[in-house]
């Protein structure tokens, strides 16, 4: 699209306290203020940690107020992860105006199906003329998911994931494939450190890939890091 405003895009991997939504929301708020990006992507279940039995997080949960406030200050759309109503693994779209459920994970992994139900619709958000497709973890490994999302006319494929440190190459391989196959920017926020649910050492390495498959920005492996780039 001509005359479209460049978009500052960030991926963040905040420290996580399992099941402590209030503390995690404050950590998300810190990341939003630090990144000063138009869009900040967070990992899968970032507000609760990978605790599959954790309660759902409502869009009007007052514990999310610090994150809403930070988004208002920075002019940011935060894409945060949480269990949501209907027993889905959700992506919450957080702005200064409040919180909505933007997407429900379509492809569940491992034991997730014992608690959660899959979503049935790809998710796309319009931000300043940019179309951002949404994904959560295993979605990124299913070619049909990227294809169906890309078919909606996206510019960015944004995913929150969780991968163990020993499998750190998996998100990279998937992101490169999606970027080069569909010629879109790919933003992957990957948990770092301990996340609950038995993950004592998550991979980190959150990154943004160009449509040509090159890494434009990358965080390290430490909780609290973030990376950002401006796309145009």
Image (cartoon, rainbow, N blue to C red):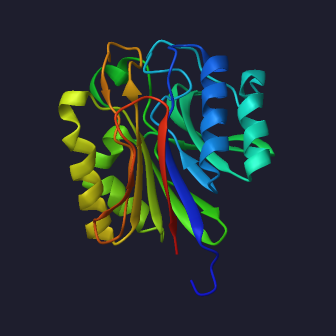
Q: Is residue 46 rendered to the left or right of residue 147?
A: right
Give the percent coordinates (x, y) of residue 2. Answer: 59, 87
Q: In this view, which residue lies farthest toward the bottom?
A: 2
> Can residue 127 be seen at all in this image of the molecule?
yes
Q: Nearer the viewer, residue 49 or 55?
A: 49
Q: State the image quarter where residue 33 is shown.
A: top right
> Can residue 101 be seen at all in this image of the molecule?
no
Q: Is residue 51 above or below residue 39?
A: above
Q: Is residue 162 above or below residue 211?
A: above
Q: Nearer the viewer, residue 227 or 89?
A: 227
| Residue displayed at 47% across by 12% down | 53
| Residue displayed at 30% across by 54% down | 175
Give the percent coordinates (x, y) of residue 79. Answer: 58, 44
Q: State the image quarter where residue 128 is shown.
A: bottom right
Q: Is residue 52 above or below residue 6?
A: above
Q: Nearer the viewer, residue 226 or 38?
A: 226
Give the percent coordinates (x, y) of residue 144. Answer: 29, 56
Give the percent coordinates (x, y) of residue 120. Answer: 46, 45
| Residue displayed at 79% across by 38% down | 69
Q: Is residue 185 rendered to the left or right of residue 90?
A: left
| Residue displayed at 36% across by 67% down | 210
Q: State the image quarter where residue 24 is shown.
A: top right
Q: Is residue 3 above or below residue 99?
A: below
Q: Is residue 146 rendered to the left or right of residue 12?
A: left
């Amino acid at each position: 699209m001509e005359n479209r405003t460049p978009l500052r895009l960030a991926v963040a991997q905040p420290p996580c306290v399992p099941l402590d939504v209030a503390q995690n929301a404050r950590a998300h708020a810190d990341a939003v203020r630090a990144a000063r990006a138009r869009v900040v992507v967070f990992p899968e279940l970032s507000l609760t940690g990978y605790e599959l039995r954790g309660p759902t997080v409502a869009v009007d949960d007052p514990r999310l107020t610090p994150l809403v406030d930070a988004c208002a200050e920075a002019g940011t759309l935060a894409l945060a992860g949480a269990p949501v109503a209907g027993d889905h693994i959700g992506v919450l779209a957080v702005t200064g105006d409040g919180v909505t459920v933007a997407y429900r994970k379509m492809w569940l992994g491992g034991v997730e199906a014992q608690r959660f139900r899959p979503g049935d619709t790809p998710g796309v958000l319009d931000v300043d003329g940019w179309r951002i497709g949404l994904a959560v973890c295993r979605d990124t490994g299913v070619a049909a998911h990227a294809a169906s999302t890309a078919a909606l006319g996206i510019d960015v494929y944004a995913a929150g994931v969780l991968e163990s440190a020993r499998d750190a190459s998996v998100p990279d391989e998937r992101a490169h494939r999606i970027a080069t196959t569909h010629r879109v920017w790919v933003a992957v926020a990957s948990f770092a450190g301990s996340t609950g649910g038995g993950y004592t050492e998550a991979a980190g390495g959150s990154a943004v890939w160009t449509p040509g498959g090159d890494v434009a920005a990358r965080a390290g492996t430490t909780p609290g890091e973030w990376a950002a780039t401006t796309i145009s």
